[in-house]
Image (cartoon, rainbow, N blue to C red):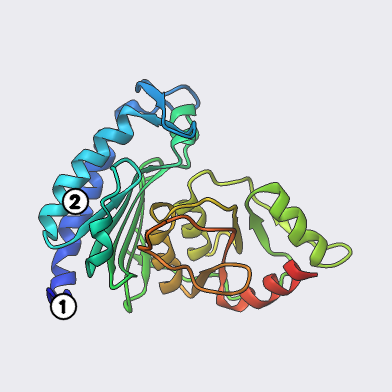
């Protein structure tokens, strides 16, 4: 079995990874029309979700460049046919070339490019780049999280009073009912990119992010590490941590929150 990456090897990866993410954004950006329909060709995948030529182009670029960075790593991406051989690999790239494709194609600014490197099933590196607004969310396991190079932390609150929450309306309604007769939540407009939804919990601009069932590893893994390193957690509604690189990379309903808010949210959810 190949040896895991050393700390020095991970550090050496980061400058090149930052450059690769910027180049990937440069591929996608010309197709984006803020407030209007994308100029990219659009078609539907099996199941009806949309994909654009920008998704495919970014995916192909990242497959080449990331595989060159860590040749021993397997690959799991939204736009590439899954190879079950990844299950036997210690290192796996988990990639969403455009997270929030519907936002991208309709001109909404909240889309991102999300890349994680797993080591033994756990995120080792997480990188979420938001081309609109030029925001880089970055984390290496055990070294904290940053936004554009500056350290970030979740909001330190430990009570749901005044919490800023976002997510699908049915989930927000359930949380609101369980939180008491008149909770003073501030509801934040839903953030289409799940990676950005988690990243904004990490930087303290959102307190609770709710995620409906059917998210995939590539939607979550990169931002999960950013959030963990910023003092937060991604878990299901029993409190269990989110597993990655399983045969079926699909997840149920999830919660993203500061560690101090996890139990208050889970308690309200069960009322």
- Locate residue 154, reporting x and y percent: 52, 70
Q: Residue at x 65, y 48 (%)?
A: 168
- Point out which mark residue 45 bears: none
Q: Quadrant of the N terminus?
A: bottom left
Q: Are marks 2 and 1 in contact (CB under 8 Å)?
A: no
Q: Is residue 260 left or right of residue 224?
A: right
Q: Residue at x 18, y 70 (%)?
A: 10
Above or below, 121 relative to 40: below
- Locate residue 245, reporting x and y percent: 35, 63
Q: Earlier in the sequence, mark 2 or mark 1?
A: 1
Q: Is residue 187 left or right of residue 71?
A: right
- Locate residue 228, reporting x and y percent: 44, 72
Q: Residue at x 39, y 23 (%)?
A: 42
In the image, which is nearer the foreground, mark 2 or mark 1? 1
Give neighbour class at mark 2: few <14, some 14-19, many 20+ (Cα, 10 Å).
Answer: few
Q: Quadrant of the C terminus?
A: bottom right
- Point out which mark residue 6 bears: 1
- Please indicate, yes or no, whether residue 161 appears anywhere in the rendered image: no
- Please indicate, yes or no, whether residue 232 appears anywhere in the rendered image: yes
Q: Is residue 109 left or right of residue 157?
A: left
Above or below, 143 relative to 18: below
Q: Report the label total.
A: 2
> How far apart in space, not on screen, are marks 2 and 1 (Cα)?
21 Å
Above or below, 250 relative to 207: above
Query: Mark 1 falls on what kind of element?
Result: loop
Q: 15 or 236: which is nearer to us?
A: 236
Query: Mark 2 falls on what kind of element?
Result: helix
Give neighbour class at mark 1: few <14, some 14-19, many 20+ (Cα, 10 Å).
Answer: few
- Locate residue 3, reporting x and y percent: 13, 77
Name the residue beneath numbered marker 2.
19
Q: 269 or 132: which is nearer to us?
A: 269
Q: 166 or 83: which is nearer to us?
A: 83
């Amino acid at each position: 079995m190949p040896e895991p990456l050393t700390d020095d090897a991970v550090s050496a990866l980061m400058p090149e990874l930052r450059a690769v993410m910027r180049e990937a954004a440069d591929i996608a950006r010309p197709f984006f029309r803020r407030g209007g329909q994308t100029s990219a060709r659009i078609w539907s995948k099996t199941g009806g979700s949309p994909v654009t030529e920008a998704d495919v182009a970014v995916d192909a670029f990242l497959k080449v460049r990331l595989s060159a960075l860590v040749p021993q790593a397997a690959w799991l991406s939204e736009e590439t046919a899954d190879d079950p051989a990844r299950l036997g690999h210690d290192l796996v790239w988990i990639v969403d070339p455009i997270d929030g494709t519907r936002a991208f194609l309709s001109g909404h600014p909240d889309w991102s490019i999300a890349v994680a490197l797993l080591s033994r099933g756990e995120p080792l590196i997480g990188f979420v780049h938001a081309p609109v607004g030029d925001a880089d969310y970055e984390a290496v396991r055990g070294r904290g999280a940053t936004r554009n190079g500056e350290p970030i932390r979740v909001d330190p609150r430990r009570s749901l009073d005044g919490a800023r929450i976002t997510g699908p309306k049915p989930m927000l309604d359930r949380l609101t009912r369980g939180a008491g007769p008149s909770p003073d939540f501030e509801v934040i407009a839903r953030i289409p990119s799940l990676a950005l939804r988690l990243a904004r919990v990490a930087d303290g601009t959102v307190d609770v992010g709710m995620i409906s069932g059917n998210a995939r590893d590539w939607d979550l893994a990169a931002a999960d590490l950013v959030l963990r390193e910023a003092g937060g957690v991604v878990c299901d509604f029993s409190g269990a941590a989110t597993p990655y690189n399983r045969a079926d990379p699909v997840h149920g309903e999830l919660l993203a929150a500061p560690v101090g808010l996890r139990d208050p949210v889970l308690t309200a959810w069960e009322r």
